Image (cartoon, rainbow, N blue to C red):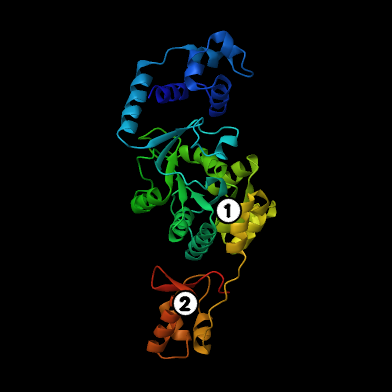
């Protein structure tokens, strides 16, 4: 475990940024070699400040050594696995960004298809229609073979992960705390499901709390893992826009799902569209943009899975009439019963038929919402 100790000690050097640390490790061949380098050897590295050279050459404080060894004991006990920048298992696409995390803590297994990942992020206060649209889009992309990346947050993030899980596909949650902690706490089961079908990852040491300043920084990992970032229901102050900004800096594609024009919670996504983000109404919109970046076997797989239109279900006249009363925003059962020209028992039967056919879905509060693609 000496290699791990060297990584963790080097990461603790004051003033050493992730980008510089990774450059040094690549230059010298490993963290032990960096720590063993002389001052003159370090000074020959372009752009390395004298203060950083001195910090690397200085022996680590006893408190740093104690913390490093505590982490190593936790790793040995199975609290997480660790993937470093020089490991074959380190995500290839993430390694290409200017400041990749030198060390990734992983619970679960990083999907082998991470090179075909798509990130989906957005509002923590998602509308029922936004969450449904996100989950269906995520599921469709996952069925094509894409790995879905998000941040395990409430709202849109959770819907993105659940869509991938519904497709029985891999998903990656990048968290703003240690991988041995769950935030938000109500996502304990979702987190376990993700670990069983993908991975929960973090650059933060084990035990790190979910502090506010951790989250903007982790967003560069979400975009860095992905071919593109889809933003859903983001207001103008949403953290999802930070992820979109990182995506642009990393030369990733940026997509946005439009919403109601006058709703503030969509204005961030609409601003991205004004700035050139690809508008997304269905999975096809994402796939068309990403196809040139895909290797040929995966491109063929996506084409076969993604461009075969599924015929809509054939509905009776009464089913169509009831379906017309259900919209993108939640409609209460009482409203449908009042508006439909049939007796209560028949309306309830028709609603059940529509739900079984995938035309509508139930949402909280005894409401129904129309499934995407049923416009």
Disc 1 is placed on an element classified as strand
Badge nearest the viewer, 2 or 1: 2
- Residue 219 screen position, x and y as percent: 52, 42
Work out which residue is located at the far front of the displayed protein and give it.
Answer: 297
**Residue toward you, 68 or 262:** 68
Can residue 262 be seen from the camera position used here?
no
Badge 2: residue crowd in 10 Å (few <14, some 14–19, many ≥20) = some
On screen, residue 227 above or below 327: above
Disc 2 is placed on an element classified as loop
- Residue 42 screen position, x and y as percent: 57, 14
How many callouts does the rendering have?
2
Q: What's the CA distance linking mark 2 and mark 1? A: 28 Å
Residue on which disc 1 sits: 230
Q: Quadrant of residue 246?
A: top right
Badge 1: residue crowd in 10 Å (few <14, some 14–19, many ≥20) = many
- Residue 16 screen position, x and y as percent: 52, 22
**Residue toward you, 190 or 339:** 190
Which residue is drawn at the image coordinates 39% and 38% (left, top)?
178
Which residue is drawn at the image coordinates 61% and 53% (left, top)?
297
Residue on which disc 2 sits: 357
Can residue 3 be seen from the camera position used here?
yes
Q: Quadrant of residue 199?
A: top left
Q: Quadrant of the C terminus?
A: bottom right
Residue 28: give its label.
none
Which residue is drawn at the image coordinates 66% and 55% (left, top)?
289
Quick one: label 2 or label 1, which is nearer the N terminus?
Answer: 1
On screen, residue 169 above or below 204: below
On screen, residue 90 above or below 58: below
Q: Going by the image, does 46 lie left or right of 322?
A: right
On screen, residue 80 above or below 371: above
Q: Quadrant of the N terminus?
A: top left
Q: Going by the image, does 192 lie left or right of 36?
A: left
């Amino acid at each position: 475990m000496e290699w791990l100790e060297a990584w963790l000690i080097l990461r603790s050097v004051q003033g050493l940024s992730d980008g510089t640390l990774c450059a040094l490790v690549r230059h010298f061949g490993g963290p032990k070699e960096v720590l063993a380098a002389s001052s003159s050897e370090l000074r020959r590295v372009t752009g390395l400040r004298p203060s950083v050279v001195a910090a690397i050459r200085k022996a680590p404080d006893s408190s740093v050594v104690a913390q490093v060894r505590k982490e190593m004991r936790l790793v040995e006990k199975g609290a997480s696995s660790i993937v470093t920048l020089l490991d074959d298992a380190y995500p290839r696409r993430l390694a290409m960004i200017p400041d990749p995390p030198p060390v990734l803590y992983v619970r679960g297994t990083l999907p082998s298809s991470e090179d075909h990942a798509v990130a989906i992020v957005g509002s923590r206060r998602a509308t029922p229609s936004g969450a449904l649209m996100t989950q269906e889009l995520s599921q469709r992309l996952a069925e094509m073979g894409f790995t879905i990346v998000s941040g395990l947050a409430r709202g849109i993030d959770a819907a993105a992960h659940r869509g991938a899980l519904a497709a029985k596909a891999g998903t990656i949650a990048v968290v703003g705390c240690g991988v041995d902690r769950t935030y938000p706490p109500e996502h304990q089961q979702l987190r376990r499901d993700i670990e069983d079908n993908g991975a929960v990852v973090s650059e933060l040491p084990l035990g790190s709390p979910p502090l506010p300043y951790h989250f903007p920084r982790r967003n560069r990992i979400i975009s860095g893992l992905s071919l593109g970032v889809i933003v859903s229901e983001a207001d103008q102050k949403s953290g999802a826009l930070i992820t979109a900004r990182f995506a642009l800096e990393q030369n990733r594609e940026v997509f946005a799902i439009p919403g109601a024009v006058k709703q503030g919670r969509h204005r961030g996504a609409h601003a991205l569209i004004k700035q050139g983000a690809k508008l997304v109404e269905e999975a096809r919109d994402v796939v068309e943009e990403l196809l040139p970046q895909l290797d040929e076997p995966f491109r063929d797989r996506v084409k076969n899975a993604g461009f075969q239109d599924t015929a809509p279900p054939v509905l009776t006249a009464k089913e169509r009439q009831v379906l017309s009363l259900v919209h993108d925003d939640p409609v209460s059962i009482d409203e449908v019963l009042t508006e439909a020209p049939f007796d209560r028992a028949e309306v309830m039967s028709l609603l059940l038929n529509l739900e079984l056919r995938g035309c509508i879905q139930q949402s909280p509060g005894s409401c129904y919402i129309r499934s995407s693609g049923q416009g």
